[in-house]
Amino acid sequence: MSSIRRQLRPWQRLARRYHVRRHHHSRLPWLGYTLTAINIVILAFFVFDIPLGQAAKNLSPRLIAVAGAVTDIGRLVSILSAIAVVFAVVLFVARRRSPTHRRYRTAYLIQMVAYVGLSALSTSIIVNFLKYAIGRARPPLYDQYGILGFQPFRGDFLFESFPSAHSANVGSLFAALALLFPRFRLLFVSIGLWLGASRIIIGVHYPSDVAAGLALGAWIAFAVAILFCRFGLVFSTGQDGWPRPRLNHRLRWSSDRHKSFKKLWQEPATRNH
């Protein structure tokens, strides 16, 4: 069986993985999520953009300074750099484990990095195109254009407000982390919301920009998770159809297998004594 797997090319292995799991796919509430996100963005657009956009001008300089210091976490370069550092550190630590643990941890780590990286890159490409195509004026131009100032395809930083790219990147990153580590889901969601709010505090985005960015990033991370789940990478399909991380299952299986082999080797030695 292992020799057959070695002879298959990578794309053939992926096709085989997908074929095995094709009957386990469940319908997901895409329509409900989309309608909810659109309603939140519309509500923010007509209710919160004007008051919060104006209030941001009167915030404490200290608060603005703090928000400015943390807001760059949402840059794509920062996210990819953090992923590279975490990958290097975890890979170094994994080398000190037993060969069985190291093999599965390394494979799973590579899949995790691929998942988070693909989510972040896909989000960045889509959101930057949307910003360029929509061309909404930023809050500093509120007195001149208001909240309905649009100049599509202008290519000017001051007309690339909707949706927020930083917020989209943050939404993608922390939604991916929430899916990978469900126990800390509330923590990741909270951090994502605060980082998104930092774009409003420093006065470069309206609330609707941030809401749209966070929703878009989270949606893309979830869609990529479903894609990986279809091929049995990183995630497996839960009973409700949602992706569930495979890490605990893999590590438990490898640990039990390692213990069973160790027991078999120790039994003859015990009998001889």
Image (tube, rainbow, N blue to C red):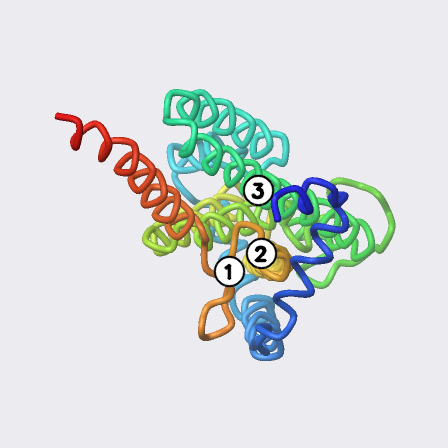
Q: Viewer-proximal residue, 111 or 51?
A: 111
Residue contact at pointers 1 and 2, CB within 8 angstroms: yes
Q: Categorize mark 2 by other alpha carbons within 10 Å: few (<14), some (14-19), many (20+).
A: some
Label annotation for residue 232: 2
Q: Categorize mark 3 by other alpha carbons within 10 Å: few (<14), some (14-19), many (20+).
A: some
Q: Which residue is mark 3?
A: 111
| Residue found 38% across the figure and 48% down from its top | 253
Secondary structure found at label 2: loop
Label annotation for residue 236: 1
Q: Amino acid at mark 1?
A: Ser
Q: Earlier in the sequence, mark 3 or mark 2?
A: 3
| Residue found 54% across the figure and 58% down from its top | 207
Q: Quadrant of the C terminus?
A: top left
Between the C-alphas of marks 1 and 2, the distance is: 6 Å
Query: Can you see residue 159?
Result: no
Q: Viewer-proximal residue, 192 or 164?
A: 192
Task: Name the outermost residue toward the right.
Answer: 153
Residue 137 left/right relative to 24: right
Residue 245 lies, with reference to residue 256, above or below; the image says below
Residue 66 lies, with reference to residue 92, above or below; the image says below
Across and down, in percent, residue 219 comes to 60, 61
Secondary structure found at label 1: strand
Q: Mark 3, mark 2: which one is toward the viewer? A: 2
Q: Amino acid at mark 2?
A: Gly
